Image (cartoon, helix red, strand yellow):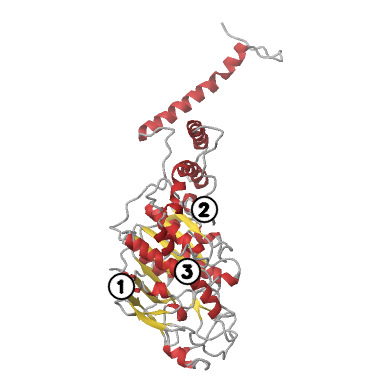
Amino acid sequence: MKMKFREDSEHSSRRDFLMRSANGFGAMALSSLLARDAFASTGEKPQKSVNPLAPKQPHFPARAKSVIFLFMVGGPSHLETFDPKPALDRLHGQKMPPSFGEVKSQFVKAGTPLMGSAWKFRKYGQSGIEGSDLYPHLAGCVDDLAIIRSCYTDSFVHAPAMYQMMSGRILAAHPSLGSWVTYGLGSESENLPAYCVMTQPQGLPEGGSPMWGAGYLPAIHQGTVLRNGSKPILHLDPPKEIGQNQQRQMLDYLNRMNSMNLREGDSELSARISSYELAWRMQQHAPEAVDLGKESKATRTLYGLDDPDTAEFGTRCLLARRLVERGVRFVLLFSGGGPVSVQWDAHDNVKSNHEQMCRWTDQPVAALIKDLKGRGLLDSTLVIWGSEFGRTPVSENGKGRDHNPTAFSMWMAGGGVKGGQVIGQTDEIGFKTVGERYHPRDIHATMLQLLGLDQMSLTFLHNGRNERLTDFGGRVIESVFS
């Protein structure tokens, strides 16, 4: 008997509705079966989320497994910190000889006189490397440092030079160092962010968030900014209104809903799903990780937490140690940010500026190295100290120094680095590099090598091009290795 629908009625019967819906129910069932079979073929369950930050094997045996990058915002003067220049001191007040070339900078005019350092250098450690009176605590650690004195960048403007130091390019929107490292290696911690960023309370550096952004890498690889103060991570307490089991069920349901809309290549939604899972685990584990009250009095004193001048930066250095101790892959820690008066950008008066910035950072940085070493963590943790550029040997307004991208110092310690050595050199007045010179690409290539990553194999296809941190390649500074 052929069924005829009543088209002259405003309302369908229950039988009409079921017959009309039959195809829809079949489609829903088929979709469910296909999804089940797809997951069965991969051995996964639909509810199981894959951790995109799971640990990955390096390309070859690694010397280091984590990085702490200490970024000095604004450009410290290498002439006052790690590159003594007796000739510059002797020429103080004189015009720069033409044989050294012409100073090209933002604010210094032609004919500006040279300015010697206001601080003395003396030899330290078994290596006898000269350290500045500005950094007496850190000078005592020279046997652990590989000081690279012949660094240079391509811009004398803060933000582009910062981008180049942090991503290899002078333009924003390229992945940062920490993003490339977590992309290549994942994280050893399932309960903490793989890439943590700690800024200065007074504000951000000129380069801003692109300095720790993921660029065109999946969004999960961008840095997580920890807050300043007693609670670096907010909202870690589980909600009191619901129990832990109910919260877990809600998260599972949310993940299933998100997964239904997840398309291949949708890194934003994928990062959100992973972030929800990480937030759940952090509620159980992060409070302990950021609880500095568990540290001994001796450790807190070592970092200067009982001194108002060093307490803030010392707290962040101690937190950096606790993070890498718990498997965080990359920590970016800024000294300087916000107003120029609390950056290393010593245009007006290098003496007063560097006295302040070194007073805040000297003891905490030295404590970080000593503490890592004492706990057996320095061998596996690469510590890098650096900035976007150095300062000019000529004065600015008689007391300050302008930006100098043609020569500045950086140093590395731990993580397979051979300490107690100086690599590269600058001319007699510290204006330009002499001989071998090292670009940010070379610094990055060296860092990747220490982490067991081949710079040419660490690629990401973007706009039809295999992008790399080092672009067309950097030179690994072989003498850095122990």
Q: Relative to residue 356, is residue 254 depicted above or below?
A: above
Nearer the observer, 195 or 82: 82
Q: Residue 98, position in %: x, y?
A: 49, 93
Nearer the observer, 368 or 402: 368
Q: Relative to residue 135, is residue 468 depicted above or below?
A: above
Residue occupying image coordinates x 32% and y 61%? 374
Label 3 to label 2, Cα distance in Å?
A: 19 Å
CB contact under 8 Å: marks 2 and 1: no
Query: For the residue labelled by badge 1, is the local secondary structure a helix, a strand or a loop?
Result: helix
Query: For the residue labelled by badge 3, is the local secondary structure a helix, a strand or a loop?
Result: helix
Residue under label 3? 361
Please report whichever mark, 2 or 1, sits nearer to the chain's N-terminal start. 2
Residue occupying image coordinates x 54% and y 82%? 104
Badge 2 density bin: few <14, some 14–19, many ≥20, Cα 10 Å: some
Please report whichever mark, 3 or 2, sits nearer to the chain's N-terminal start. 2
Q: Residue 22, position in %: x, y?
A: 54, 18
Q: Disc 1 or disc 3, which is closer to the eye?
A: 3
Quadrant location of the N terminus in the rendered image? top right
- Three-letter amino acid code at disc 2? Pro
| Residue 232, label in figure | 2
Badge 1 density bin: few <14, some 14–19, many ≥20, Cα 10 Å: few
Residue 482 quadrant: bottom left
Label 1 to label 3, Cα distance in Å?
A: 27 Å
